[in-house]
Image (cartoon, rainbow, N blue to C red):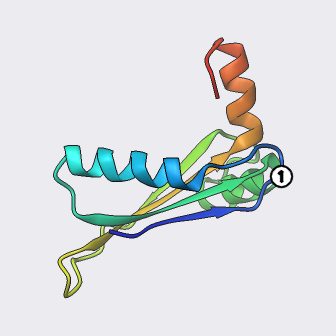
Amino acid sequence: MPIDIANSQRLAPIDRRALRALCARVLAEYGVRASLSLCFVDDAAMRVLNARHLGRDEETDVLAFPLDEAPGPDGCRLLGEIVVSVETARREAARRRKPV
């Protein structure tokens, strides 16, 4: 079950190993055999994606693009892509007094 991680932002380090382990645990807990893509961006990139895909000209913390493709020969399917704006996530965490 590949878990692909892309990081195009420079505001915060991304621990790819820990994220892959977390995603694998969550998928296993739900009995889902699938691959997943995570992408970390800044607010400018998120604003473009939000406008393009949802028609909203604003930042948001997370966008999810479900793909749910049929399983391949190995029985694994591509579940989808999750895009996180690190800038907005940091602001929201501070506002809610939660760790990023």
Is residue 8 shown above or below 85? below
Q: Residue furthest front?
A: 17
Q: Quadrant of the N terminus?
A: bottom left
Q: As drawn, is 100 to the left or to the right of 82?
A: right
Residue 80 lies, with reference to residue 82, above or below; the image says below
Which residue ends up furthest to the bottom in the rendered image? 73
Relative side of 15 to 95, left or right: left
Label 1: which residue?
A: 10
Nearest to the observer: residue 52 or residue 64: 64
| Residue 90 relative to residue 83: left or right | right
Q: Is residue 44 left or right of residue 24?
A: right
Residue 55's x, y, as percent?
65, 53
Residue that appears at 73% across and 35% down = 88
What residue sits 41% from the left and 45% below the top?
22
- In the rendered picture of this protein, how many numbered marks are placed on residues? 1
Measured as percent of width and height from the top left, residue 25 is found at 31, 46
Residue located farthest toward the top when viewing the structure as drawn: 97
- Residue situated in front as seen by the camera: 56 or 92: 92
Between residue 69 and residue 31, name the one nearer to us.
Answer: 31
Q: Position of residue 59 (x, y in %)?
A: 74, 42
Going 19% across and 88% down the picture, which residue do you hit?
Answer: 73
Q: SS at mark 1? A: loop
Task: Report whether residue 59 is seen.
Answer: no
What is the quadrant of the C terminus in the image?
top right
Residue 17 visible, this angle: yes
Q: Nearer the viewer, residue 31 or 61?
A: 31
Q: Amino acid at mark 1?
A: Arg
The correct choice, above or below, for 62 with respect to 3 in the image is above
Tell me if mark 1 has few (under 14), some (14-19) or many (20+) residues whose alpha carbon lies within 10 angstroms of its own. few
Quadrant hosting residue 87? top right
**Residue shown at 82%/44% (left/top)?**
11
